[in-house]
Image (cartoon, grey):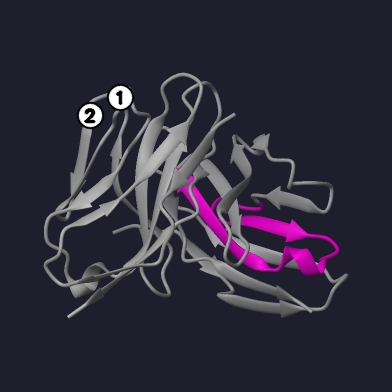
Amino acid sequence: GNSVTQMEGPVTLSEEAFLTINCTYTATGYPSLFWYVQYPGEGLQLLLKATKADDKGSNKGFEATYRKETTSFHLEKGSVQVSDSAVYFCALSPIQGAQKLVFGQGTRLTINP
Amino acid sequence: EPEVTQTPSHQVTQMGQEVILRCVPISNHLYFYWYRQILGQKVEFLVSFYNNEISEKSEIFDDQFSVERPDGSNFTLKIRSTKLEDSAMYFCASSERRAAETQYFGPGTRLLVL
């Protein structure tokens, strides 16, 4: 079946630190991969996506590369800000017919000034 | 910027009561979805809807659940007889095309069943 596993949270960092949130997936075929972010009191917002192997998604200083060989889509940012504090969700969309997103459990990130 | 809206933001109900959660998807989108997130757990897919019919549903989406697009703008999720375990955050989403395209999420409705 299809599943997504994220690193356990919560994660607490200082401002300007380097961020990595690990995400690995299990899927048949070649899914599309997504990172969604949920700021306090808000809905899920798409942060970035990649639709095929070796694609790199990027947005707001965040990056993630679709690695087929390691079935991973780790989220990185070189220098985090307090405003990046949120819950981050990795998700996949199976290519074969299904229309649903399969989510990881979410990682809560807190950035201290 | 167009966005998905949901009402109410919070709903408290008694076990066994019916609830209707409402969503207004982005106007030119064709695919609509409901997801839920029980506190502390993953966001789970419930159902997808296209061309006025359910296109896929999960095992969670049993006979107690139904969806409807009663007019050109609203998309509703009805739970006929709520159970304690239905307490969760319910998210509506829409996409212009299939799920490989970006799904845009609403802010959610927090449902508490007492």
Work out whether residue B97 or residue B51 is closer to the camera in this orientation and state it: B97
Q: Position of residue B52 (x, y in %)?
A: 64, 38
Camera sees residue B1: yes
Nearer to us in this view, B107 or A91: A91
User: Which residue carries the number 2 mark?
Assistant: A55
Give left or right: position of A42 versus A15: right
User: Which residues make up the magenta segment?
Assistant: B70-95
Q: Calculate the distance from the C-alpha at mark 2 to the C-alpha at mark 1.
A: 6 Å
Residue A74 — which label? none
Q: Which residue position is annotated with label 1?
A: A52
Judge whether residue B75 is colored magenta.
yes
Comparing A106 with B101, the one in front is: A106
What element does badge 1 sit on? loop
Residue at image x 56%, y 29%? A98
Image coordinates for residue B100, horizontal then vertical, percent: 41, 32
Rendered position, A27 above or below A101: above
**CB of mark 2 within 8 Å of CB of mark 1?**
yes
Q: Please, what secondary structure does the residue beneath circle 2 have?
A: loop
What subunit carries mark 1? A
